[in-house]
Image (cartoon, helix red, strand yellow):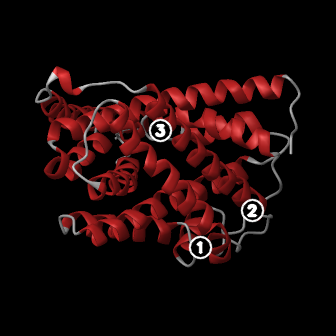
Amino acid sequence: MDSKLKHSLLTLAKVVLGMVVLVAAGREVLGALAKLETSEVRFSAPILGLSLLCYLAGMAVFAEFWRRAVGALEGNLPRLDCHFAYFVSQLGKYVPGKAWVILIRYGLVGKNRLSFRGVTASSVYETFNVMGSGALLSFLLLLLLGADPTLPWLALGLSAVLLAACHPPVSGWIATVAGWGSGREEKLMPVPSWRVFRKGAPLLFLGWVLAGASFPLAGAGIGVAYPGLSEVVLTGAASGLAVAAGFVVLVAPAGLGVREWLLVETLGPSVGEGPAALVAVAARGLQVCGELGMAAVLYGMRKAGGPHA
């Protein structure tokens, strides 16, 4: 088969599969939203603002983890430039395949500062660690809360796969296949060690505590009434699993549909399907607005000649 035709068919298959996932998950979420009473939606600007603040703080912590990964692999990256590239690149995850995240980061901070290999390796390492730690935290909390047994073990499975893929020995095998292995003559990207993860683990879990808190706050900000504290914690706990699951479904840009569906499935039995869908939609909307706003603020700071350290 002609290579161009094969590539076109593969691209078409990805698009079709992505549309099927989005439509199927979207129908479930829209069906849950249809069960809501209009009177249940009540906006609270202070709570929504707190939700947004928690999310942005969590993302800033993840940006710091990426900065450490860059330092461990290739060199130092000024903090302001790092955070600017990190927040702007989040918009690339809305393109199927998520490769635009790496391309945007390289376009903003690469070239003379970092090699493309350095941006790619550090970004993959950061992303897999962030997703894997979020799923791991979800596993621990869901197990503690006594959730449906399927959910914590799904979270554990996702965590194990994602964390293993970016650490030795699995990362070494992947690096060799990708042409980054140490057996080549030219200087290549070293494979990160577990030591980098151990030193950065507090940042990862702090980031998820903050980002996870934004989900129940987003729901509370639009009138979702949680029966008790356990439901609030459950909402935050489900976020890591939902985001990680959305990430591994590559055909769903930014996990769109997958994340929302999983949140409805997880929270529905406790808070109701309608309120659960409301939490998912509100969190998504706030986070997109926050990423856009933060990227604009950081861009302004860079233009104004803010500190690049």
Q: Quadrant of residue 111?
A: top right
Q: Report the number of numbered marks.
A: 3
Q: Of helix, strand and loop, which one carries label 1?
A: helix
Crowd tier of the residue under label 2, counting other residues whose Cα lies within 10 Å: few below 14, some 14–19, many 20 or above:
some
Kindly report the distance in space between the C-alpha atoms of the residues bearing marks 2 and 3: 33 Å
- Amino acid on which disc 1 is placed: Gly
The quadrant of the rendering that contains the C terminus is top right
Going 47% across and 34% down the picture, which residue do you hit?
287
Q: Secondary structure at mark 3?
A: helix
Type of the residue with mark 3 = Ser
Distance Cα–Cα, label 1 vs label 3: 39 Å
Q: Position of residue 84 (x, y in %)?
A: 70, 35
Residue at image position (52%, 57%) is 130
Q: Where does label 3 land, which residue?
A: 51
**Label 1 belongs to which residue?**
172
Foreground residue among 214 and 134: 214
Left or right of 192: which side holds 177? left
Residue 307 in sight here: yes
Judge depth for marks 1 and 3 and give the one in front: 3
Q: Give x and y (percent) for residue 172.
A: 59, 73
**Where's residue 244, x and y in %?**
40, 54
